[in-house]
Amino acid sequence: MNAAVLAVRLVVLGAIGFALGFEPGFGLHGVQALTLAGFVLAVFGWIGTALLADDRFRPKVALHAVFVVGGLLIVPGTMQTALGLILVCVALLSTATGVREPYALGITIAAGIVVALLYGLLVGPVIGLVWILPAVGSYLAGTTRRQRQERLEQAELLLAETQVAREREAQAATAEERARIAREMHDVLAHSIGAVSVQLEAADALLEDVPGTERALDCLRRARGLAAEGLTETRRAVGALRGDPGALRGVLTGLADGYQGAAHLELPETVPALRPEAALAIGRIATEAVTNAGKHSGGAPLWMTLNSADGELCLWVHNELDPAAEPGSGGFGLIGMRERAERIGGTVTAGAEETGWTVRVRVPHD
């Protein structure tokens, strides 16, 4: 219950209490004492329902009943001004709004019978029956209001479920498209590169015993190496697109194994689940960082660490610098790494430190 509703209730109760103070003979004796007790119960019941949590159903029913009883106790002493009946109608309206059936209907029937008896005995039978109508009208108004609130809540719930279903459909469509691209890459690109590698190997074998072909053999062997690297990268990309949880581990292991100097790799026992595009981006960033290290460090030692902390996957790549080599400024390679990280909600920082060059990647994960 929000503060505005509580404030409105306090104002209404204050106005009724102020009006009761002008009732003839209002005090602590006889019917007037009953009126005072009823007002105290009404305040306790109505304010209590405002402060009570929505999931406390049974206490809420009891407090609404106390509110109604408080209004009924005021009725005998306020026959002329009908303040008690007004408070009973307010109580029934609040009860029908905040309490589900059959409790609201039961409280209303009991209150209607008491109102009819009080007015029937103190004023007349016909008047007693007439004054039931405001109580019934309050119940119907409260029921209509409660049903409207329930429909609004159901509509909001349905809207939320529809949104979740659409997001799942979009995720399924994205996953299906990634799988299709992965199949195309595997069936076309990977097979083509594999065939090229086989042909280069055959050409190498044919030229090996031919005099004067050393330069050609060197070119062929470099081409074979590039083809093998391309085939490996293609397979890694296919694994990442298909959401293979071991794809990133395989990329980092391959980079460490293929580094031209000493490489130290630290990986967690379990790599956190990543979106395929995130795993692919981290792998590309790591490849760029290791490639730059090979260019500028002259084969100096390399360290790579992957860990998870505070909902982020962190990759740390550090290489010592060759004293004879001058570190590069990063150029477009560093810009590309940062752009890849930004597209998946991550960050990249890179810079020279005391012992060399460090690249840090932070990417949120589920």
Image (cartoon, helix red, strand yellow):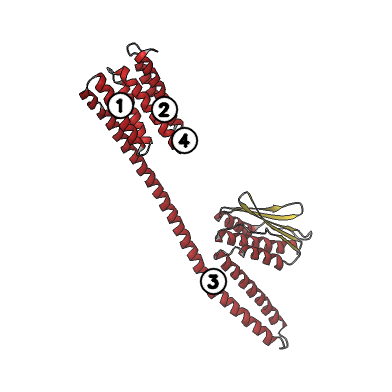
Real-space Cα distance between discs 3 and 1?
81 Å
Label 1: which secondary element: helix
Disc 3 and disc 4 in contact, CB within 8 angstroms: no
Question: Does residue 152 show up?
Answer: yes
- Residue indicated by mark 3: 185
On the image, which quarter does residue 318 sit in?
A: bottom right
The mark closer to the camera, 1 or 2, is 1
**At 43% from the left edge and 31% from the top edge, which residue is drawn?**
50
Q: Amino acid at mark 2?
A: Gly
Q: Residues within 10 Å of mark 2 (few under 14, many from 20)?
A: many
**At 59% from the left edge and 70% from the top edge, which residue is drawn?**
235
Real-space Cα distance between discs 4 and 1?
30 Å
Horizontal and vertical percent for residue 326? 74, 58
Horizontal and vertical percent for residue 283? 62, 62
Q: Which mark is residue 53?
A: 4
Label 3: which secondary element: helix
Q: Amino acid at mark 4?
A: Ala
On the image, which quarter does residue 232 sit in?
A: bottom right
- Residue indicated by mark 2: 45
